[in-house]
């Protein structure tokens, strides 16, 4: 027990641990919808746009979150606007908008020839430099996002799996999509100082994919993903402390390890099911597989 309590003597570690816990749980929840909606590239692109905004804010002496938030939200709105006509696909719009804003940030940095410490933290992550102000921002974003997504569970569920059914039930798909993108943007901005722009996409996807390996139930995927995200953040922090490695990178590597373990568990479970279905008739061995839906199971009608 003393082995785990020793790092807690340091305030910077306690701050980092709390931030990793909140961001891990937040990414665990929001990452489920990112993966199932095929929006992994969106998360990657919005993080780059937010970094471009942080760079612009640095030049004009804006608050870090103000600059990153303004550009991140602008990118989200522009992407939604460009894709409304259907002529330009989502991946193309993301590539155009977010890359342009990121390039603007890089151009500004090269112009002023100065690299602020906060920008370096946004790019590579600096969880041990988390302040009380950062914790408040992360806490507000995490709480607000979870509350909003709780009340939007039904619209998000329908619009994720069946757009036609969503329209029948009167759900405004485009509004739900825009709101979710805005929540994703805020989550990315709040977590930039934790793992950095370069690794946000990985931390956003890994908990959800790990949970997906363990269950086919949509409800359980969300619960497992939140727990796995929190464990990834906390476990990665402890590993980084004892191995003296970069916290953001260690959190990502620990998440990758959990994902690998989940694939092994899934493989073993499938082998057991296959073995249980085998039947012997003399020298002939064959199987009777059970009819099952290998897709994600959900019960939207009962929610």
Image (tube, grey):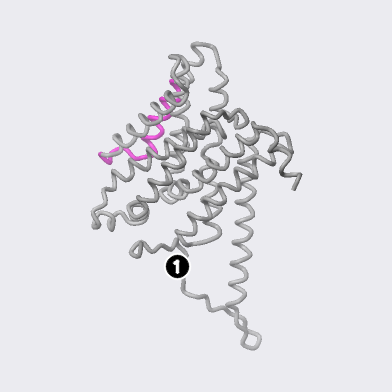
x 43%, y 49%: residue? 33
* 132 or 241: nearer the viewer: 132
Residue at image point 44% right, 38% down: 141
Asked if 233 appears above or below 98 in the picture, the reply is below
Tell me: residue 47, above or below residue 153.
Answer: above
Q: Residue at x 26, y 51 (%)?
A: 171
Name the foreground residue: 21 vs 84. 21
Q: Is residue 55 magenta?
A: no
Query: In the rendered image, which quarter is residue 113 located in?
Result: top right
Q: Quadrant of the C terminus?
A: bottom left
Pinpoint residue 72: horizontal percent, then vertical percent: 40, 30
In this view of the protein, which residue sits in the foreground, 155 or 252? 155
Q: Is residue 126 left or right of residue 136?
A: right
Where is residue 100 drawn, in percent x and y? 41, 25
The magenta span reads: 85-104
Residue 175: name its quadrant. Answer: top left
Q: Would residue 241 be found to the left or right of residue 35 on screen?
A: right
Residue 151, relative to residue 270: is it above or below? Answer: above
- Residue 7 locus on image (x, y percent): 71, 38
Count residues near mark 1 (Cα–Cα under 10 Å), then give few for <14, some for 14-19, many for 20+.
few
Residue extending farthest to the right is: 2
Badge 1 marks a residue whose secondary structure is: loop
Q: Main secondary structure of the magenta part?
A: helix
Where on the picture, by quarter, is residue 15? top right
* Residue picked out by circle 1: 293
Farthest residue in the bottom direction? 282
Residue at image position (60%, 48%) is 231
Q: Is residue 184 left or right of residue 212?
A: left
């Amino acid at each position: 027990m003393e082995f785990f309590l020793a790092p807690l003597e340091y305030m910077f570690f306690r701050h980092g641990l709390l931030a990793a816990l909140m961001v891990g749980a937040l990414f665990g929840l929001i990452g489920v919808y990112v993966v199932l909606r095929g929006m992994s590239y969106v998360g990657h692109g919005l993080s780059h746009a937010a970094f471009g905004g942080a760079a612009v804010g640095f030049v004009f002496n804006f608050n870090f979150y103000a600059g990153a938030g303004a550009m991140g939200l602008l990118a989200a709105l522009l992407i939604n606007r460009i894709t409304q006509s259907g002529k330009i696909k989502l991946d193309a719009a993301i590539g155009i908008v977010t890359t342009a804003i990121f390039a603007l940030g890089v151009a500004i940095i090269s112009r002023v020839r100065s690299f602020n410490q906060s920008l370096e933290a946004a790019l590579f992550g600096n969880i041990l430099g988390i302040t009380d102000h950062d914790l408040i921002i992360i806490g507000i974003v995490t709480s607000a996002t979870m509350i909003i997504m709780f009340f939007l569970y039904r619209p998000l569920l329908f619009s994720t799996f069946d757009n036609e059914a969503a329209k029948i039930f009167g759900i405004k798909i485009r509004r739900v999509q825009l709101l979710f993108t805005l929540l994703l943007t805020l989550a990315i901005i709040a977590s930039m100082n934790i793992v950095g722009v370069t690794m946000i996409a990985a931390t956003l996807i890994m908990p959800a994919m790990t949970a997906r390996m363990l269950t086919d139930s949509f409800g359980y995927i969300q619960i497992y993903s939140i727990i796995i995200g929190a464990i990834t953040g906390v476990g990665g922090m402890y590993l980084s402390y004892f191995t003296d490695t970069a916290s953001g990178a260690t959190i990502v590597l620990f998440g990758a390890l959990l994902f690998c373990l989940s694939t092994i568990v899934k493989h073993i479970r499938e082998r057991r099911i296959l073995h249980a279905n085998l039947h012997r008739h003399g020298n002939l061995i064959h199987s009777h597989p059970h009819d099952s839906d290998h897709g994600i199971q959900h019960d939207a009608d009962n929610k």
